[in-house]
Image (cartoon, rainbow, N blue to C red):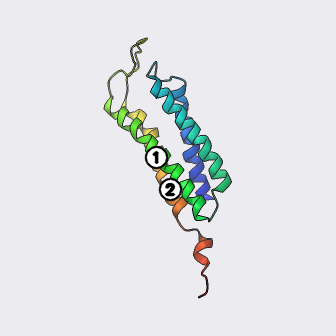
């Protein structure tokens, strides 16, 4: 149950994290910013469904699929983390129209949290379950 809970926290976090980018909470920005939000939203939805459907499985194939999904989610966080730190103290508007919004490194913290949760979900997905450890075929 803990395995699925960690996965759900990560996937629902990705959904919630994508929404401010989709709805321009940071002012008028490049279209790529909105696209990133959509990718985060859709990734979160797919991972939520996968975690609910196959999160408790002991089959290596399904655990591998979950691990790949959370690896994608983790990698998806790297660029926003880098950009929030890089543009700290500057405006991020594309200038049409200009926005008074100024970037701050604190906005990278939710991305860092999702990155860490995704890495924990990967380890959890790949870790052998008790059922597999207790099964030992006889020679």
Q: Is residue 100 above or below residue 70?
A: above
Q: Is residue 135 above or below residue 111?
A: below
- Position of the C terminus by quadrant: bottom right
Percent coordinates x, y for residue 18 in the rendering: 53, 33
Q: Left or right: 77 with respect to 125?
A: left
Numbered label attached to residue 74: 1
Q: CA distance from mark 1 to mark 2?
A: 9 Å
Q: Is residue 35 above or below residue 72?
A: above
Near-viewer residue (74 or 62) = 62
Do the residues under discs 1 and 2 have CB atoms within 8 angstroms? yes
At x 49%, y 46%, the residue is 72
What is the secondary structure assignment of the residue under circle 2?
helix
Near-viewer residue (120 or 62) = 62
What is the secondary structure assignment of the residue under circle 1?
helix
Mark 2 lies on residue: 122
At x 46%, y 46%, the residue is 74
Residue 129: name its quadrant.
Answer: bottom right
């Amino acid at each position: 149950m803990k395995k699925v809970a960690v996965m759900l926290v990560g996937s629902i976090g990705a959904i919630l994290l994508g929404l401010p980018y989709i709805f321009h909470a940071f002012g008028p920005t490049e279209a790529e910013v909105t696209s990133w939000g959509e990718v985060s939203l859709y990734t979160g939805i797919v991972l939520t469904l996968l975690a609910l459907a196959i999160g408790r499985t002991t089959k290596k194939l399904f655990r591998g699929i979950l691990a790949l999904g959370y690896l994608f989610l983790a990698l998806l966080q790297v660029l926003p983390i880098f950009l929030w730190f890089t543009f700290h103290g500057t405006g991020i508007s594309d200038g049409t129209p200009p926005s008074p919004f100024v970037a701050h490194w604190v906005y990278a913290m939710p991305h860092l949290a999702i990155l860490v949760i995704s890495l924990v979900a990967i380890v959890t997905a790949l870790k052998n379950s008790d059922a597999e450890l207790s099964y030992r075929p006889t020679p």
